[in-house]
Image (spheres, grey):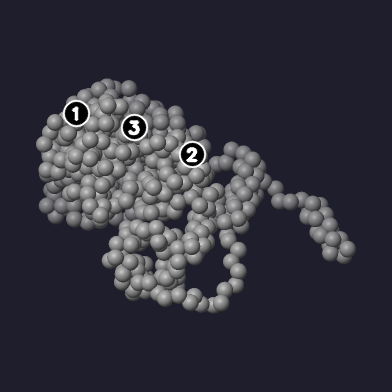
Amino acid sequence: MAADESAPAAVVTAAEIARLAGVTRAAVSNWRRRHPDFPRPAAGTATSPLFALPEVQQWLDRQGKGRETSAEVDLWHELRAQYGDDLLTALGAVGAQLLGTAVEQPLAEPAAAALTAFSAERDAHALYTDLVERCIASTTRSGGEPMTTLALERIVSAFTGPTDDAAGASDRTIGAVYDPACGIGTLLLTAVPGAHRYGQELNPATAAIAEFRARLDGRTATLACGDSLRKDAFPDLRADLVVCEPPVGVADWGRDDLLLDPRWELGVPPRSESELAWVQHCYAHTAPGGRALLVLPSSVAYRRAGRRIRAELVRRGLLASMVALPPGLMSSHSQPVHLWILRRPAQGDPAPTHIRMIDLSTADPDGIGIGVKDCAPTPERIADVPPVDILDDDVDLSPGRYVTPHHGDYPVEYAALRDRVQSLARDLLDLLPELPAGPGRIEAAPLGLGDLVRGGLVGLDGTKPTSRTDQLDTDYLRGFLRSAANTRRSTTASGTLRLNASGAQVPQMDIGRQREYGEAFRRLAAFDELLREAAAIGDRVGALAYDGLTKGALLPPSATSASSGKSESQEAKDQ
């Protein structure tokens, strides 16, 4: 696909802004909170926003934080211009050119020239790794193709290494690694060094990227295309380590055709439990003495339909550990997930006496996963639970059910959270603009959003309109589209909010007036975002206060202080 006027404007993630400015992602988050004029997201989602690159560069220049774009950034934007959101095809074309392989959609001249320039700075493997990381960080992949995030990969890799026997690891040499839903190969290729890799992937374009990554990294890998559940490409493989982030919530996973499949050692998975089919598939490919690590939605640990299979895992001593991970690790959703660690006992192995439950659900996703010691659960996050304590009517494997929340120093933590609440309150007040009284209506002719889109003045990315002209302010557009009238037009009978471009309207104003409204709307949007953070902090400090008071770790204000305060207040009123 050649570049044309409809190609998306260059956008960057918060991580890419950090690279441009030479700062951390935390610094970018702080800029967004502290600077009302920081560019608003042009696309993406609330949790993974994308920003227009020209706006970001202009803001960085105004702040004295700008730097020249690198060859990597230039190549990335040429790829976006040629392939749009089809970044898988773009990565495939780059890998093919680096390895001299033919593909259906090769790089056009601008992208090919940018790749040549970037190749002069980096070796092929490092170059491709950088592009893959950018693709993973992007939220506008073709078809919303889910990918293993880098933070999740670090955590899974940390738990594949030697830990204690309760976590299901050992010091044995790993000769084979298998991932039956390998995607672009992130877990398969980074789990352990030196092993031969076996991977299967349904999407041929995705499997090609995994193969390119393996070849450029000099790793030995055997990759196959197809559905691992329906058509297993490696039926006789028994791997020392199995890693998998399988697809979730798949209703038609082939159950009717697989009722007598020998992989169902623990029972035929219910139709609604495709994830437990993947659990048993991975376990069937695990060699004696080996282990399997799967990343699954937290609901798989307690859903009623799967309790019989969960009970068999516990009863037979196959479940070594459950790790509750924090939200924000998945590319396709923001819900928390669990890491299931299974073991296949070798001959002569003693029967396990407990299952290790680890609760990292409240940990910072960006701060864990560099190694097992960093993931590492402090003692209060761990509970070694005898199987008999799990085998009740629910067979709930959620670590939070067994790990008792603990706060090391209630007074210190409470004081810090209280200070944060005070700081947030000040920031919220600063962001909330003073809005003087108006005449009660806006005397301006309406502009139809559909007309603006058809005229090429506005681009739509889902529900996020973006101005394509200097005569329209993006925040002015988005602000007025949140009016009660436009919201009613865009709300379906089922209550779902979808932008109705044909019916939405905004008032016609000169650009100066638009920017005045846009500034107010920007501050309100920042206020909304900070208010959500304040709500989360409020939940934490409230829970901590209740827990601390009821445990005796915190005390209420003394009666003397309370009465003294009341007297002083009364005296002030009397005066």
Q: Residue 546 or 552: which is nearer the viewer? A: 546
Label 3 vs 1, first from the N-terminus: 3
Vertical placement of 69 versus 480: above or below? above
Q: Amino acid at mark 1?
A: Arg
Q: Residue drawn at (38%, 72%), measured in percent from left and top?
A: 447
Q: Secondary structure at mark 2?
A: loop
Residues at discs 3 and 2 in contact (Cβ within 8 Å): no
Q: CA distance from mark 3 to mark 2?
A: 35 Å
Q: Residue drawn at (22%, 40%), measured in percent from left and top?
A: 110
Q: Residue 572 or 447: which is nearer the viewer? A: 447
> Looking at the image, is mark 3 or mark 2 nearer the viewer?
2
The image quadrant where one finds the C terminus is bottom right
Q: Amino acid at mark 2?
A: Lys
Specify whether residue 561 is in view. Answer: yes
- Could you classify mark 2 by the number of other residues whose Cα lies within 10 Å: few (under 14), some (14-19), or many (20 or more)? some
Specify whether residue 488 is in view. Answer: no
Q: Which residue is mark 1?
A: 215
Q: CA distance from mark 3 to mark 1?
A: 20 Å
Residue 464 is situated, as x and y percent measured from the top left of the image, at: 36, 60
Q: Which residue is mark 2?
A: 65
> Looking at the image, is mark 3 or mark 1 nearer the viewer?
1
Q: Which residue is mark 3?
A: 157
Label 2 vs 1, first from the N-terminus: 2
